Image (spheres, rainbow, N blue to C red):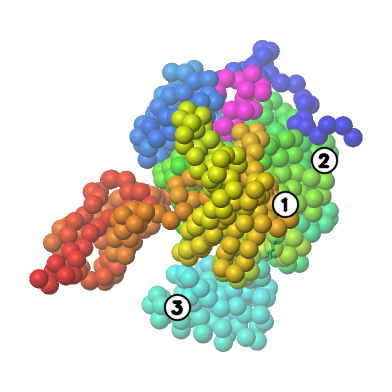
Amino acid sequence: SGEWCPSKKGESVLGGKGAGTGRHNIEKILIANRGEIACRVMRTAKKMGVKSVAVYSEADRNSMHVAMADEAFCIGPAPSQQSYLAMEKIIQVARVSAAQAVHPGYGFLSENTEFAELCKQEGIIFIGPPSSAIRDMGIKSTSKAIMSAAGVPVVEGYHGEDQSDECLKDHAKRIGYPVMIKAVRGGGGKGMRIAHSEKEFLDQLESARREAKKSFNDDAMLIEKFVDNPRHVEVQVFGDQHGNAVHLFERDCSVQRRHQKIIEEAPGPGINSEVRKRLGEAAVKAAKAVNYVGAGTVEFIMDSRHNFYFMEMNTRLQVEHPVTEMITGTDLVEWQLRVAAGEKLPLMQEEILLRGHAFEARIYAEDPNNNFMPGAGPLLHLSTPPPDSFTRIETGVRQGDEVSVHYDPMIAKLVVWAEDRQAALRKLRYSLHRYNIVGLSTNIDFLLSLSGHPQFEAGNVHTNFIPQHHDELFPTKKATPPEVMCQAALGLILKEKMQTDAFRDQSDDKFSPFASSTGRRINICYTRKLSLLDGENVVDIAVSYNQGGSYNMQIQDKTFLISGEIVNEDDTVYLRSSVNGTVCKSRLVILDNTIYLFFPEGSAQVGLPVPKYLSAVSSVGMQSGAVAPMTGTVEKVFVKAGDKVQIGDPLMVMIAMKMEHTIRAPKAGVIKKVNFQEGAQANRHAPLVEFVDEEAESK
Ligand SMILES: *[C@@H]1O[C@H](CO)[C@@H](O)[C@H](O)[C@H]1NC(C)=O
């Protein structure tokens, strides 16, 4: 059936032939963004022969998107307000560089009406919809009213002033049971009840009012259709300046944490072609209702019987657009550029065909075991599965780069495609295992347990998936098996041997029995005691060297016969080992007193004991507790030396990854020293505040 590749249909006016009326020659675009999406847009620009101009903050000077661009301009300091959100500066760069169009990516200025207007005034093409569409879709009540008028199903509700029992009950009946009764000022589930039938309505209403009164001192209620275990299903739409609009099928983005998507797929699992058709038609209706131009996404909430209701429209290219590209064989950034240039849509609805299944997993610098706390830091080691036509790695960072505290902590999007869902899921897991990162915590292992969950495999996804399957998704950490500890020991010994061998080439008298397989003293039986760390636990391994290159390793009462070698393939170091006859190949990285082993079925970290003087230093900060939970900027300092604080008193506010964290006193005491000023950057685990120690105090 030939090659499945981006559409070549349609005649381009880009970077070439003259422009007719309403058509523009786009030869150079400015990308008002950073990271993976800036790189993604540039790749298509390059393919089309369009020059790209990057803008960057001081923190991004050496970043990948700057390196990829044809021209790059620094637009200010790291905080986005002073760089990526500084409209005037960006417009100025567009003027200076003579870029005809601006691609806003997602986030930042992509849904900013003012910026779209500003571009227009300057005669610069904003690659996105008209500012009126951005404005209308940005206001929830307006967008719902427009969609409702256009015949798009919306979640029915009552948000009125009249709070009488009769009025609320009448609306519940109109909306249809089950309904949700919600406190207008509600939050965190307080003042919220479900009424399954008219019979229980008044009781539930009273109960919700009582709770709301207690919690918010306000018992005003709203009524909404209740959607049980909802799914988040969205449809990709595209419009052109000639009044055409098409859809490119749906994506399911139900699996979320902290209200952010982590695995997306297309098409939606279990959605039949009849529902798919209705979804697509509703989305096109929505796009036409606002004269939509460019790439947009219509989000629906879907119940267990596949009824769906409009939630909102995102007037930009979405993070997860690649899964749509994979199942339709399109390049949506190319479409955006063509449409912006005034061309007609490259394909008509009947020409857009769905093939196969695609997944996207978002790889984040974060700690799933600590409520998905965002992280930052250097990517000391980064190896990825090799990209091919069906495996895409969308990223803006390379090994050695840093995930900055100033921006989104996403490291990469791993996108895979296969003929069907099962095959695509297998490919996803295979590729995730080969995505190996050292230097900061990532969600890769969590993505593996998520994508391997039987209910995920069955396609039973909904927005409550992670809380519902919490226990299985976060298994309590077990001890590292002794076989793996042996492999870590072997990796360490072989690495040492390589280094000693290299050293011995220069000075021939150095000799270690563990560092050599040849030598004079080979008949002497040596036993070396290695102490490795499995989490907090010290594991002692007695290693003895056998003739012929193998080792005996004893852990407690178990003995293993182990042999192996270190091999280099494609710049990556692997450890091949045989433990009592079981052979295994794993990626080996030794960095920062830690041995990392990446196996096909998971990864292991084994620590080398840290010298005493070092651990003493770090435990001071840890015990006092007033340490930076993550790398970030100190926003506010509430205390100074000499202040007396009670346990739980706020000491500082830190900002990292756009989130605020209040650092509280871990104990009562007197502040001895404040280590960071407002505006300073603190690394993860840095002691922020020191306490006068109690003994000194009592003297
Ligand atoms: C591994 O093999 C050795 C030698 O054959 C044997 O003595 C030992 O018990 C085996 N260890 C385990 C844990 O099975």
Q: Is residue 250 left or right of residue 365?
A: right
Marks 3 and 1, how far apart in space?
62 Å
Q: Residue at x 59, y 31 (%)?
A: 41
Q: Is residue 497 above or below residue 428?
A: above
Whether residue 362 appears in magenta in the rendering, the answer is: no
Instruction: Name the mark on residue 212.
Output: 3
Q: In which quadrant will I find the N terminus?
A: top right
* 2 vs 1, front mark: 1
Q: Residue at x 67, y 76 (%)?
A: 177
Whether residue 47 appears in magenta in the rendering, the answer is: yes
Amino acid type at image mark 2: Leu
- Ranked by sequence position, the earlier of labels 3 and 2 is 3
Residue stretch rendered in magenta on the structure: 33-52
Q: Secondary structure at mark 2?
A: loop
Residue 37 quadrant: top right
Q: Is residue 13 above or below residue 665?
A: above
- Ranked by sequence position, the earlier of labels 3 and 1 is 3
Q: Residue at x 65, y 60 (%)?
A: 560
Marks 3 and 2, how far apart in space?
50 Å
Q: Residues within 10 Å of mark 1 (few under 14, many from 20)?
A: few
Residue 464 quadrant: bottom right
Q: Which residue is mark 1?
A: 583
Q: Residue at x 74, y 39 (%)?
A: 390
> Is the shortest distance between ligand 1 and the CB of mark 3 under 8 Å?
no
Q: Is residue 20 left or right of residue 271?
A: left
Q: Which residue is mark 2?
A: 353
